[in-house]
Image (cartoon, helix red, strand yellow):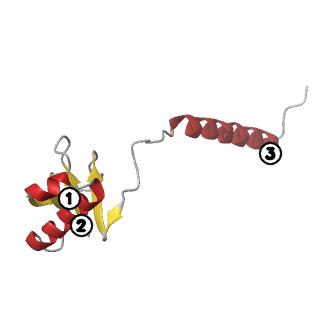
Amino acid sequence: MRRPTPLLTILLLFTVVLISLSVSNSTVQEVDNSLANVQTVDGIYIFIRSIPVNKYIVMGTIDCPAMVNSWKEGARVKAMIKYANKKYNGFHGIVFRTGQDLCEADVIKFNSK
């Protein structure tokens, strides 16, 4: 029986390595379904029932005035942005606290910006 040539042996080994790498890469990758694109209003990132993935600092907390409490969500968010603009300079986003009917939020600034 003839022995395989060295070139054939190298090609077979290379093929086996490529197949094993492609199989292992396809099973290792997992998708993070919790990531999302965040809406912006007037250039400010708005987080409702979510928190930023990137690192940030909390510049302070804002509460909506009593009259804003009865407004619809869109008007309430715009009012909170306006209020935050008066108190904090250079903020990037507002993280609304869960269970507060969009009337309490943290004003944040990303570390990377």
**Residue 7, numbered label:** 3
What residue is rendered at 55% in x and 34% in y?
27
Q: What's the residue type where badge 3 is placed? A: Leu
Taking the spot 13% from the left edge, 74% from the top edge, the residue there is: 89
Mark 3 or 2, which is nearer the eye?
2
Quarter of the image for residue 1 reads top right
Residue 33, position as x, y percentages in the image = 44, 41
Say which amino acid is labelled 2: His
Dot 1: what SS?
A: strand
Q: Secondary structure at mark 3?
A: helix
Q: Residue at x 73, y 40 (%)?
A: 15
Residue highlighted by disc 1: 56
**Residue 13, how many percent across, how many down?**
71, 38
Check if mark 2's residue and mark 1's residue have beta carbons within 8 Å. yes
Which tag is nearer the camera, tag 3 or tag 1? Answer: 1
User: Which mark is on residue 92?
Assistant: 2
Label 3–label 2 contact, CB within 8 A = no
